[in-house]
Image (tube, rainbow, N blue to C red):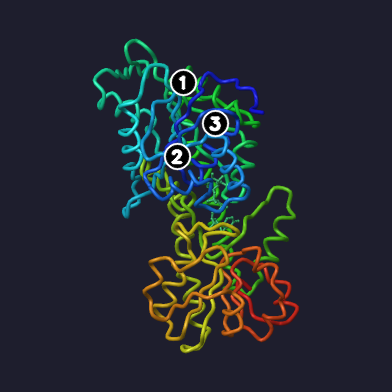
Amino acid sequence: MAPKMVTKYKKVTVLGLGYVGLPTAAIIANKGLSVIGVDTNVSTVKTINEGNTHIIEPDLEVLVRSAVNSKNLVASIIPEPADAFIIAVPTPFTQKKKPDLTFLQQAIESIAPVIKGENLIILESTSPVGTTQLIAEWLSNIREDIEFSESDNSLKIDGKNIYVAHSPERVLPGRVLVELVNNDRVIGGLTKQCGDEAESLYRLFVKGECHVTNARTAELVKLTENAYRDTNIAFANEISLVCDKLDIDVWDLIKLANRHPRVDILKPGPGVGGHCIAVDPWFIVDSAPEETPLIQASRYVNDNKPAWLVQKILNSVDDNATVSCLGLTYKSDIDDLRESPSITIVEKLAQHHKGQILVADPNIESLPDKLCKILNIEFCNFEDAISRSRIIILLTDHREFIEIDKSILSNKKVFDTRGIWRSFLTNNNLESIGD
Ligand code: SAJ
């Protein structure tokens, strides 16, 4: 039986059926609302309408299947009129590290013809400060009958309000469904009423608290969260270089430092990937370049870790040795390759190392385009990779790697960038990194 509906927004169009849009659409549809999921990728639309998913995320497939079977979720390439629109399209950065709002602009152009009075538009994509207001301006530029007033931030059509708000997604890949429901939400309205209207929709499925603020604050809150994490990871990565130089085990060091009640150092690793943390800090830098030396330095520290690691590997392995690289995704137990430092590491290694490079990742089916044309790289399963090489570079802490029978690592030279095999390596006097 469909749960009781508490919102006046009965039909919702979700634009962008990716890591955030699809789970959001499926959750709302399973709450009994009618949801149109819009994506420009025809094959994504087809997959979803067949009740399947194109991304790996715990429990998502079951939820999507149930939403599609109930006919509450239908995917399409064209937006339909609705009561509310949720926008979850990518907001990447350009080569020059500037925000690229092309997908967002296209999404707004696609819904402009169907917008009507009392509609609610929520921007969930991570965006530079000022973007929510830009949406209102774009709409009033596209449609002559839509009017935006800068004096009170109101957006109107025939005297009726259109509500525009920003509520940044804050979910962790791998825990998306749990966090979508349980995390607090920050909701920034162009006006107070816009924020309240957006809250009334989220109340349908959010168990966390909803904090209503203005749009600019909400935009910067999201960017600040990810820049904060980037800076903290950069600290851990910098300490790992210090430890390497001074021959101290970084994992022991951090464990001991973290015994202090006010110290909580994150984990060093091969670098920072993903479409969020490696990107969002640049949106702050773009808005305030002079004021952000720390945020910029953190980005450089994290971006330099792959090159440092490659140099360390090259310095300590024979030119012709076969090397195994385990884990291509940017973090554990997901299939997301965006901005993955592992890809940079494999690519750089292949450029400078003469021997064969075996690449394995249980969560992906083939090499990404960037790597598949490089002659000395071969994709294989991880057991094969380990048995065929004496040099093992562990790049991602996937469950399968944590659970392997460690005896197959005996006699290997291991670069364990995530510290998951540390105790086995130390007990067997095998070489690791960061010590
Ligand atoms: N990493 C480390 N050491 C750590 C933690 C992470 O090296 O101690 C690395 C990971 O391996 C990965 C990268 O950092 O390469 C980012 O991973 P993550 O798990 O920290 O974060 P994301 O990018 O998967 O998700 C983040 C989350 N933001 C915060 O935790 C502040 C998530 O809540 C956001 O919704 C998401 O960005 C987003 O979409 O913005």
Marks 1 & 2, CB-CB < 8 Å contact: no
At numbered mark 3, what does the secondary structure look like: helix, strand or loop?
A: strand
Kind of residue indicated by mark 1: Cys
Q: Is mark 2 within 8 Å of ligand 1?
A: no
Q: Which residue is mark 1?
A: 194
- Residue 425, x across and y down, in percent: 70, 77
Foreground disc of the pair 3, 2: 2
Foreground disc of the pair 1, 2: 2
Q: Earlier in the sequence, mark 3 or mark 2?
A: 2
Kind of residue indicated by mark 3: Val
**Displayed quadrant of residue 297:** bottom left
- Reply above or below: 208 against 194: below
Picture residue at 45% right of the left edge, 37% below the top: 37
Kind of residue indicated by mark 2: Ala
- Residue 401, x across and y down, in percent: 64, 69
Picture residue at 45% right of the left edge, 26% below the top: 84
Q: Which residue is mark 3?
A: 186
